[in-house]
Amino acid sequence: MDRISPLLTDQYQLTMVYSYFMAGSHMKQSTFEMFFRTNPFKGSYAIFGGLDAFMEYLVNFTFTEEELAYLKKTMPHAPPAFFEYLKSLHYSQLTISAPSQGTVVFANEPLVIVQGPLGFCQLVETTLLVLCNYATLMCTNACRMRVATDAVFTNAKKPNVDVKDAIKKVLADKVLLEFGLRRAQGPNGGLSASRYALIGGFNSTSNVLAAMQMGTIASGTMAHAYILSFTTGLEELIPEQHAMVQPLLGGKNFEWFAKRVLAWKSRLFGGEKPPLMLQLNTQQDIAKVSFSQYSGNEQELSAFTNFAFTQPKNFTALVDTYDTLNSGVPNFVIVACALLEFGIQANGIRLDSGDLAYLSKQVRLIFNKVDQVMNEQYDNLTPCSPDMHNKYDGQFLKCKVVASNDITEEVLVQLQKEGAQVDVFGIGTHLVTCKAQPALGGVYKIVEIDGQARMKMTEDISKATLPGSKDVYRLFLSSGEPYADIICKKGVNIPVAGQIVTCIHPHDELKRVMVKPAKVVKLHNVWIDHGELKYPHKIENGKVILQHPDLASTREYVLEQVYALREDQKRYLNPTPYKVSLNQDMNQMLREMALGIKKIQLIE
């Protein structure tokens, strides 16, 4: 990960730090907290992201000579001692606490807690927010789209389910691909989107640079431009490309493969013998699909043949360039049959326009119909050469239907309800731009200075900050479901499993509930403890190299937590809020400070 400059901040951070320095208060011990006030996308939860980038920023925090020279020009009144102070800042002066990356979190609870000298803590505000706000928003958006594709998250949980196995099955059954680079807010936005989409629940990305950086393989095959670039039919194309040889196809040249494609076209859809698809049309179990006569686009067939020959193990055909059901899908079937003779499974087709529910069902009916043809007739259709004869084993039932038509979370929910036969979703614009909610609204507030709790009061009580240093604990019921997060004064009356805890609403102390948790988990880990780096790392040539958890395990961690939430808390519309509560000590301190700050006016 590239170095993040300390100058990636707002000017007012530097002006405040300068005033702290001149007043001699820059070394006062302080505590700041990052949190957000409303769960994104009108939901009940969020997925915490950005810890990896924030930790990279901190461990590499240093002002270069070039950066200091710039500040000296923009702050000519500042004495040399101020710039020496900036040069001395180092992560070893801080304590950083935060949940693990990918943790399910909720509104109005501390996420990142920064403790240390006032000046340094103030200076990291903007950078922390820019690194964690979008990352959390993006992880949450991706996760919500994952939840929308599979009813396992919103249906009642089945007893005795191995959650890890269930999540692995979810990731295999419905594949989500991030296709948003061209719609992202600049190249850096595109890279961040790809990374946090995968953490939030997506399987892969089309972004090649992001894939390289993450150690994964990018996904993608063809666009409409590729298909439209072919201007002749297959018979006319053969003389142009006949000499190409493909080792994966037994060393055969393009002419041989193209002639096999034409042979399959003739046998399936017309020629000297009655077309096989016509013979099957009268059978009741495969009615509804009229797929007996070839009416496809010959240039599209040329494009598919060329692509399958040059990349036989990566053949996913974009089928809506001319006519999805009457051209694209038949042409895919023809070419896929030619690949079958070499024992190669075609991947499937991609829908990029139209009614995805209807079209996906029709495509699946066609694949089922072709499967019946292959089961009954395949041995009679393969060439005489024994080295080319491969057994049919239901390959068309394994072909995937990919959909990528301006997909939103709402569309995913509706497709699931309609029983759409889509196996893979390619999602771009609405994922990477978080179009439904472009910003998280995370904030960073001081809550303690030199051991004295601080509280911001506003006209809107819901925007008042919770004073003092805190710990947050997650209370689990015997069912394994998380029931509430409880905010406590740091180190005071820590909740214990098996003992009754009173949970009080942060804004209405009359709303309270008593909970006897079966398990209690502290939400935050300490990643830097009074200067000691606890985050996984190694030292190479005197330099700290952070070791971030791999994406696959983080993604599974995310989905396992979301699976554990109650079903009604994951509804697309009007989900039940998750409880974020105060314990009695925290509630008492909040009440006393609020009354002390808010003076009662005398009206005469």
Image (spheres, rainbow, N blue to C red):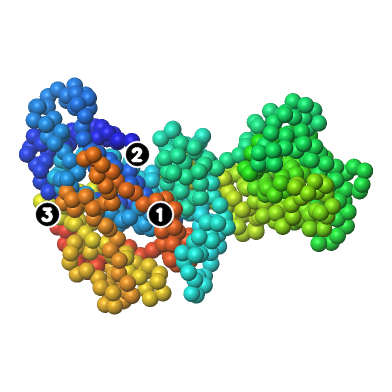
Q: Nearer the viewer, residue 20 or 557?
A: 557
Q: Residue at x 18, y 64 (%)?
A: 491
Which residue, as the protein is rendered here, is positioned at the far front?
386
Q: Quadrant of the N terminus?
A: top left
Percent of width and height locating residue 197: 46, 47
* Amino acid type at mark 1: Thr
Are there few (<14), some (14-19), or many (20+) residues within 10 Å of tag 1?
A: many
Q: Residue at x 49, y 71 (%)?
A: 161
Which residue, as the protein is rendered here, is positioned at the far left?
24
User: Mark 3 = which residue?
Assistant: 452
User: Mark 2 = which residue?
Assistant: 1
Are there few (<14), some (14-19), or many (20+) residues within 10 Å of tag 2?
A: few
Compute the Cα span from label 2 to label 1.
18 Å
Q: Nearer the viewer, residue 471 or 535?
A: 535
Percent of width and height locating residue 213: 42, 40
Relative to 412, residue 272 above or below:
above
Q: Secondary structure at mark 3?
A: strand
Q: Secondary structure at mark 2?
A: loop
Q: Point out which mark residue 554 bears.
A: 1
Count of marks, rendered view? 3
Left or right position of 42 against 449: right
Percent of width and height locating residue 199: 43, 50
Q: Residue at x 61, y 39 (%)?
A: 221
Name which of mark 3 and mark 1 comes first in the sequence. Answer: 3
Q: Point out which mark residue 584 bears.
A: none
Name which of mark 3 and mark 2 comes first in the sequence. Answer: 2
Q: Residue at x 32, y 43 (%)?
A: 53
Left or right position of 278 against 420: right
Percent of width and height locating residue 43: 44, 56
Relative to 520, residue 527 above or below:
above
Are there few (<14), some (14-19), or many (20+) residues within 10 Å of tag 3?
A: some
